[in-house]
Every structure is written in structure tokens, then in C-alpha cells.
Image (spheres, rainbow, N blue to C red):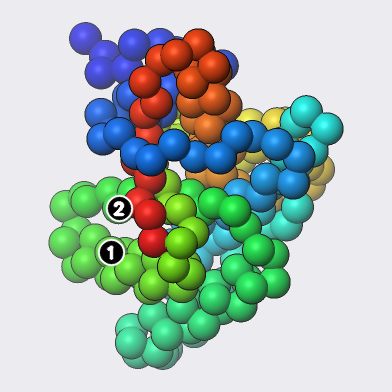
Amino acid sequence: MSRYPTRSWRAFDPQRAVGAAPAAPAPSVSDGLRVLGLDPGSRTTGFGLIEWRAGQWQHLAHGCIALPPSAALAQRLRLIFERLSELVVQHQPAEVAIERVFVNRNVDSALKLGQARGAALAAVPHGLAVFEYAPRAIKLALVGAGGAEKQQVAHMVRILLGLEGRLAADAADALAVALCHAHSRQLAQLAAAHGAAPTGSGLRR
């Protein structure tokens, strides 16, 4: 039996699917609400910014922080911290969404990914809420299948945000995280409006 109750991304609650703990209520979705999505990596870190405008989520910016492969891990972690700190100052997001670390058989890769994620989180200022989502939850929210391929996720990102052309994989993943959070936020607001208990995995900085 599937661990997820639905295959429709429009009816999917990613927080409920991953069994997240309750979080502090987030501000209502209103014009100007800006979300920064992050896909940390020890070699490339993707970012994507979306904003709620005129009743829909719109694309603001996306890109990749390419890290020198010859640089020591400590130097790459510092670059992640510095460049994301600059990005936060430049774009002033209201909330940050980040992909949860996926632990596979390669323990060394998982440890490096965890350190990259830590460097990214360290760049988030105090008081800015951070929300995390499992990779399967993100894919299920956008594509309707937790085992979707990266190309399918990128395709849905382009459709939902009206983007044309090719998206770098890490930037597409970061925008997918932001859209997953955006969908979760709207569901939480609907639930609050009907008196239901909110769900979420917010980490108050």
C-alpha cells in the first residue's frame, strides 16, 4: 500500500505525507509573499524565488551556485554560505523552503550533502522561517508520483511558472521545492479558514 493517500498534486498535502510535526502558524498568503527554494549540494547549489502576485505564484529568479570542484570542502561550504547570504539580502524572501537530506548507500556523499545543507541553513537570518520537504513529497506534489524523474519535475516547474527553455537541474529542483511549499502554504491557509489544525515542518530561525 502506498504511503501517500493521493496521486493528485492539486489535492496533495506534502506535510501530511511525510508525517511532519506541527509548526507555528505562517503568515497568510498575500501579494508580495516571497519564497526562496533551495537545493543544496556540495558541488552545485540551486536556488529559486517565487512570489504571490495577483492570485498566483509567479517566477522571480533562479540559478545555480557552481562551486570549484578542485576546492577543498571547507572552502566550498564557505562559498555556499557567502553567496546565499548575499542572495537573501538581495531578494528579501519571507520564507525559505529546503529539500531534506536523502541518505542513500553512499555515506560519504550523504555526509557532504548534509554539510552543504548546513551551510545553506546557516545563511538564513534569525527570524526567517525555514520549511523542509522530503524529495518524494516534492515530486508527488508537482508530478503526482513520488518516484518521478528529474525531467518530469522540471517540465512541471516550467508549466506551473510559465517558463520557456531549458532549466538547469539544480535550479529546477530548487523551484520545485519552492512550489511544493507554496502549495502547502495555501492548503494550510484553507485549513485555518475552516478551523482545522495547521500542519507543517517550519523551523523558526
Q: Nearer the viewer, residue 151 or 190?
A: 190
Q: Which residue type does callout 1 highlight? A: Gly
Picture quarter containing residue 70? bottom left
Residue 12: tell me if it is visible. no
Q: Position of residue 111 (x, y in %)?
A: 22, 66
Residue at position x 60%, y 68% from top?
A: 88
Residue 175: tell me if it is visible. yes
The residue identified by callout 2 is 101
Label 2 neighbour load within 10 Å: few <14, some 14-19, many 20+ = many
Position of residue 34 in the picture relative to residue 108 (left or right):
right
Q: Are marks 2 and 1 in contact (CB under 8 Å)?
A: yes
The residue identified by callout 1 is 114
Please tell me whether residue 202 is drawn above or below residue 72 in the rendered image: above
Q: Nearer the viewer, residue 158 or 191?
A: 191
Q: Position of residue 96 (x, y in %)?
A: 51, 53
Residue at position x 54%, y 51% from top?
A: 95
Q: Position of residue 194 (x, y in %)?
A: 50, 11
Position of residue 59 in the picture relative to residue 44 (left or right):
right
Q: Secondary structure at mark 2?
A: loop
Q: Secondary structure at mark 1?
A: helix
Picture quarter containing residue 168? bottom right
Position of residue 125 in the picture relative to residue 83 (left or right):
left
Residue at position x 66%, y 49% from top?
A: 34
Of callouts 2 and 1, the N-terminal one: 2
Q: Which residue type does callout 2 highlight? A: Val
Which quarter shows the N terminus?
A: top left
